Image (tube, rainbow, N blue to C red):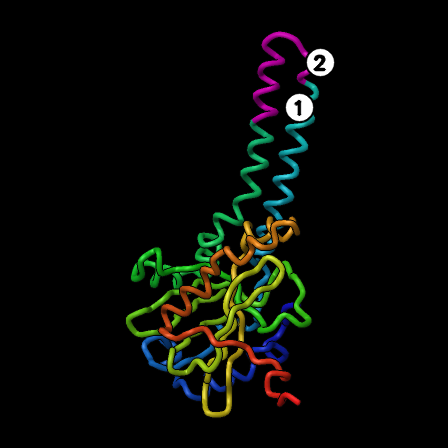
Amino acid sequence: MAAKTWEIDFRKDAIRASIQKLGPDQRENPFATDESFCVPVGEKPIPFWTPGKISLICIVIGFVFLVAGAVIISFAENQNGPGQVLLTIVGVSCSLSGFLTFFIPAKGDRMIISRMIGERARDKVESFPRADILSAELGKPGIEGQKLSIDGDDHVLVFFDRERKRLLIEGIGARYQICSEDVTHLAEFEFMNYLGAEISCRIDDETELEFAIAKVSILFELLRQMPLLFFLRKRIKNKVLAMVTETLDMPETIKLKPEDFEEEE
């Protein structure tokens, strides 16, 4: 569940360290620096309107259109002549509108997040090629205790600056910059139907920001629902991890388990 205040948010230590090392002028345009940081943009981590709530509304509207279409088509079967044709056309149109509405959150997530971020996003969208911009969700690292949430911790646009080996991340709740030289851990992230990267980044000598950044994979979810095709899951490309690894110019690290350090008897 996403935190309601910064005081209990998983980013609080990184935010405190970032504010301390960035001066007032730097906080106005933090991406002009070569520092890794995480700074908030509002008093609360999650605003009232979020992409999750918008997606839920789209799903409800989609079901309303589907039900309306089914009812109209059923009523049209009892009619004759031009009236039957007209009602059938209206019913089919409602059903198609319902199906299309379901795809708005998945296909229009970049536009929704960009609109919610506002001017901060528009300035960077004009400076980066479309292929170097990715919409995603940013949240707590690891999968233990993870729960699906309608809001999530943050919805972001990631701008991949390959020349300077850094990630510029504009979020609805916060702004982030991840520089390659500050990254201490990079690994694959997989939770439910989310695929992405798990990252640890130094903010200062005593503070690290640990987070996961991921996107929903519809194909991965379809294969997850079909256990017999489990062997195909590994063939699905983790686009987020690939772009992060390429931009930061560093290999994906392997998570070590405690037993890996135990000596063989």
Residue type beneath disc 2: Asn
Q: Residue at x 67, y 65 (%)?
A: 147
* 34 to the left or right of 184: left
- In the rendered image, which residue does mark 2 sit on? 78
Q: Residue furthest front?
A: 265
* Residue 214 in picture, x, y percent from top left: 52, 63
- In the rendered image, which residue does mark 1 sit on? 72
Badge 2: residue crowd in 10 Å (few <14, some 14–19, many ≥20): few
Quarter-of-image position of residue 52:
bottom right
Which contiguous range is marked in magenta? Answer: 76-92
Does 160 sit above or below residue 29?
above
* Residue 32 in picture, x, y percent from top left: 32, 76
Badge 1: residue crowd in 10 Å (few <14, some 14–19, many ≥20): many
Please say whether residue 87 is one of the residues in the magenta stretch. yes
Residue type beneath disc 1: Ile
Quarter-of-image position of residue 37:
bottom left
Please say whether residue 181 is one of the residues in the magenta stretch. no
Q: Secondary structure at mark 1?
A: helix
Q: Residue at x 47, y 66 (%)?
A: 171
Q: Residue at x 30, y 74 (%)?
A: 164
Q: Earlier in the sequence, mark 1 or mark 2?
A: 1
* Residue 208 in picture, x, y percent from top left: 50, 84
In the picture, the disc for residue 106 is none
Quarter of the picture containing the N terminus is bottom right
Q: CA distance from mark 1 to mark 2?
A: 10 Å
Quarter of the picture containing the C terminus is bottom right
Does 172 sit above or below residue 61?
below
* 73 to the left or right of 201: right
Does 50 sit above or below residue 197?
above
* Residue 121 in picture, x, y percent from top left: 39, 62
